[in-house]
Amino acid sequence: MKPNRAHAPVPLQRLSIKGLTEPVEVRCHHAARRMTLRVSRTSRSVIVTMPTSCDLAQAGTFLNSHLDWVRERLGNLPEHVPFGAGSSIPLRGILHRVIEVGPRRSGRVVEVAIDDNGRPALAVNGEAAHVARRLQDWLAHQAGADLTERVKWHADNLKLRPARITVRDQRSRWGSCSTTGALSFSWRLILAPSFVLDYVAAHEVAHLAEMNHGPRFWALVRKTMPRTDEAKNWLQRSGSDLHRFGL
């Protein structure tokens, strides 16, 4: 289905507010009747939506008048966890401590290890400046491998065939299925418990047969993934926190 261009949102604009370090996005929408304000848990940004009759200066005035509310919401967000030495990040739902091992000519870029205290760890090879990117690339690769395996399993189980699988850092959804059968997933699923990644894979595979969320769709999902309700509840409760890890 093609979008209705008469009601499509205008591309976002950026706004700089004194005393606010977080990014501010201003979105002008034809259907908006008044200015609204929210703080995104996934992008950790402030979002102002306004009618087409308003301009950027008015958006700034509106935001400044609600700065105390914005700061309160930002202060309640879970702390951002960078991919650096000493950080603890989940891998398949289990916390691992990040260790920098320095540049090495041999060995893997990232290895699952045990730290000096006997806890799970991720040892990252390379200069400190490259650790975050190397770790994120490795996690994305792990997500791709797990998702490819689980998509194949569910597709075989339901006798369906996806066109291709891609893994990206998409923030608006955990997975998607196009009308051509292409499946796309967020690499951040590798941070969640394995049954959650498995559910999202099953969910998108089921869309190959039913491009909706009707009873037949959910029957397919539950047929191939018995822990559907448990995974859905986990994502509703904890899914947004996965976006606080990383770059």
Image (cartoon, grey):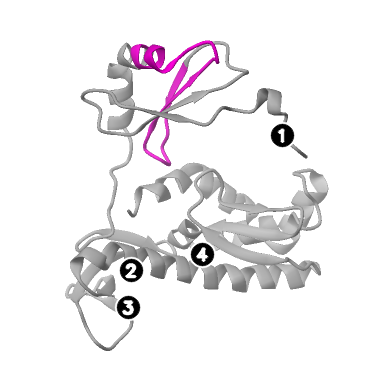
Disc 1 or 3, which lies upstream in sequence? 1
The verdict on residue 40 being magenta is yes
Give the mark nearest the N terminus, 1 or 2: 1
Q: Residue 229, relative to residue 44: is it above or below? A: below
Gap between marks 1 and 3 measured at Cα? 43 Å
Q: Position of residue 126 (x, y in %)?
A: 23, 74
* Number of marks: 4
Q: As shown in the figure, which amino acid type bears the numbered disc 1?
A: Pro
Distance from Cα at disc 2 to Cα at disc 3: 7 Å
* Pointer 2 local density, CA inside 10 Å: few below 14, some 14–19, many at least 20: some
Residue shown at the point (20%, 63%) measured from the top left: 85
Residue, far bottom: 106
Residues at circles 2 and 3 in contact by the CB criterion of under 8 Å: yes
Tag 1–tag 4 contact (CB < 8 Å): no
Q: Which residue is mark 4?
A: 194
Residue sitting at 40 percent across and 46 percent down?
241
Q: Which mark is residue 3?
A: 1
Q: Which residue is mark 3?
A: 109
Mark 4 and mark 2: span between their CA atoms?
22 Å
Q: Which residues are magenta?
A: 36-61
Compare marks 2 and 3 and give the one earlier in the sequence: 3
Local secondary structure at mark 4: helix
